[in-house]
Image (cartoon, rainbow, N blue to C red):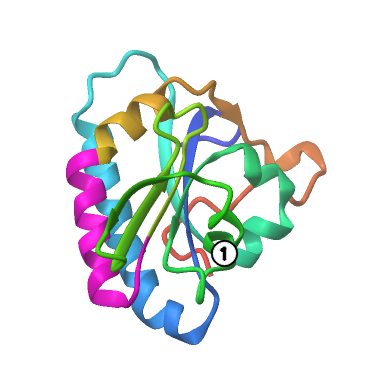
Amino acid sequence: MADGSPLRLLLIVTGSTLRAEQMDRPLAYYLKQRIEQALAARPSEDAFDSHVQVVADFRWIQDEGLHELATISLGGPGVNELAHRWLEEVPVSLAYNERYFIQMDPELTEPRASIWGMDNPTTQIAVSVFLDRFLPRFLECFAALPPIVMDPDDGDPDADLELDDDDD
């Protein structure tokens, strides 16, 4: 992707705790890979690129420009500050036995979701359920977003994310 090219950016936000880095970040990269596969399989309605980026919760919280982007929070409110903030704000779409949760607006007026479980194995199950049951609708909402232009030469150091796989 060339600098200044229009794109749609989807963020996967993980916690910054050591436990989240150890358990949730690898799961986030798995989710990223599956989303990229689903995006690649979709018919291209326009010429805009889509990019999926894994970022830390405190990066998302501190950079208000990221708040308007499609976002999936991964990991529970005990290890992910964004999941903690969205706990009461984002409706629960699925809760299973109080073991895992998928929070997402049923109308998808905003493309944001929070996926988490009471531990890593149940978070993995929640990710699997999200991929099977909710990802297609989430990607439809994501695809309807207007593309953004990220220009690192505009003088705003916070205007661009490093768009590579080694984000930290």
Range of magenta residues = 116-133
Q: Would you say 150 lies left or right of 72 here?
A: right
Tell me, yes or no, whether the highlighted magenta stretch contains residue 132: yes
Which percent across, then down, holds residue 156? Answer: 80, 45
Per the image, label 1 sits on a secondary structure element best described as helix
Density class for disc 1 (Cα within 10 Å; few <14, some 14-19, many ≥20) is some
Tell me, yes or no, whether the highlighted magenta stretch contains residue 124: yes
Q: Work out whether 26 lies above or below 45.
A: below
Q: Residue at x 38, y 82 (%)?
A: 22
Q: Residue at x 44, y 20 (%)?
A: 144
Q: Work out whether 115 lies above or below 154.
A: below
Which percent across, then down, holds residue 163? Answer: 50, 50
Q: Decide whether the magenta segment is chiefly helix, strand or loop.
A: helix
Which percent across, then down, holds residue 103? Answer: 41, 49
Q: Is residue 159 visible?
A: no
Identity, as a three-letter code, of the amino acid under mark 1: His
Residue at the farthest right position: 155
Q: Work out whether 130 lies above or below 68.
A: below
Question: Along the line of sight, which residue is nearer the eye, 128 or 150?
Answer: 128
Which percent across, then down, holds residue 84? Answer: 57, 64
Question: Along the line of sight, which residue is nearer the eye, 114 or 143?
Answer: 114
Res. 41 image quadrant: top left
Q: Would you say 9 lies left or right of 159 here?
A: left
Q: Work out whether 87 lies above or below 2.
A: below
Q: Would you say 151 lies left or right of 157 here?
A: left
Q: How many discs mark residues in the rendered view?
A: 1
Q: Is residue 116 visible?
A: yes
Residue at the farthest top position: 45
Question: Along the line of sight, which residue is nearer the eye, 71 or 104?
Answer: 104
Residue at the farthest front position: 97
Q: Residue at x 28, y 34 (%)?
A: 39
> Which residue is denoted by mark 1 in the rendering?
84
